[in-house]
């Protein structure tokens, strides 16, 4: 099967050596995504807002590959403060309530920037 890398042109992709997403056949993996817009962290101190932004970014990446959130089969949610799980879960639920992908939420010691409260990975499958 052919591998296709999907990039956004963010400087971190070349510095760190990753793609925003990788597609092999019908499987589409979106890298850990944080709430960034125009190179700046958005919704500082707002886990709900950050989660909404992350899902928006993933939705845009999926759309460029001819997919949608309906094709997401798994999410992995990394949070810096598990006590905010309800706000993060509410944002996730608004996007995935009817899709219901497999999902995991894990508290981590920190993300790349202390202003980042949430990071999400997405796996999609296009039948």
Image (cartoon, rainbow, N blue to C red):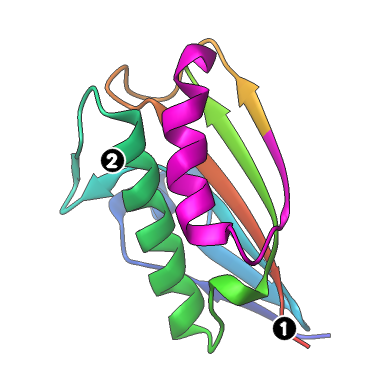
Residue 75 magenta: no
Q: Nearer the viewer, residue 10 or 51?
A: 51
Where is residue 56 shown, x and y percent of the image?
36, 61
State the count of labels.
2
Query: Which residue lies under the disc numbered 1?
Result: 126
Say left or right for 53 vs 88. Answer: left
Image location of residue 105, percent across then percent down? 64, 31
Q: Main secondary structure of the magenta part?
A: helix
Which of the two residues, 113 or 52, is positioned nearer the viewer here? 52
Q: Give the class, few, some or many, for how many residues have Cα within 10 Å of label 1's Cα (few <14, many ≥20).
A: some
The label number, if any, that marks residue 49 in the structure image: 2
- The image quarter containing residue 45 is top left
Disc 1 secondary structure class: loop
Q: Quadrant of residue 57?
A: bottom left
> In the image, 95: left or right of 11?
right
Residue nearer the viewer, 93 or 32: 93
Q: Is residue 52 above or below residue 24?
A: above
Compared to residue 80, the image places residue 55 above or below, namely: below
Q: Residue at x 56, y 30 (%)?
A: 78
Q: Residue at x 20, y 36 (%)?
A: 43
Tell me the magenta residue range. Answer: 81-104
Q: Is the residue 83 above or below the residue 23 in the image? A: above
Gap in angstroms between the C-alphas marked 2 and 1: 28 Å
Categorize mark 2 by other alpha carbons within 10 Å: few (<14), some (14-19), many (20+).
some
Q: Is residue 33 visible?
A: no
Q: Position of residue 96 (x, y in %)?
A: 57, 59
């Amino acid at each position: 099967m052919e591998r296709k890398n999907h990039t956004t042109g963010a400087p971190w992709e070349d510095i760190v050596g990753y793609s925003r997403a990788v597609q092999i056949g019908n499987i589409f993996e979106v890298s850990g995504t944080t709430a960034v817009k125009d190179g700046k962290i958005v919704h500082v101190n707002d886990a709900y807002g950050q989660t909404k932004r992350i899902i928006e970014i993933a939705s845009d990446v999926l759309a460029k590959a001819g997919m949608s959130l309906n094709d997401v089969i798994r999410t992995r949610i990394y949070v810096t403060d598990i006590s905010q799980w309800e706000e993060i879960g509410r944002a996730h639920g608004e996007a995935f309530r009817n899709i219901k992908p497999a999902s995991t939420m894990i508290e981590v010691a920190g993300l790349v920037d202390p202003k980042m409260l949430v990071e999400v990975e997405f796996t999609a499958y296009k039948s």
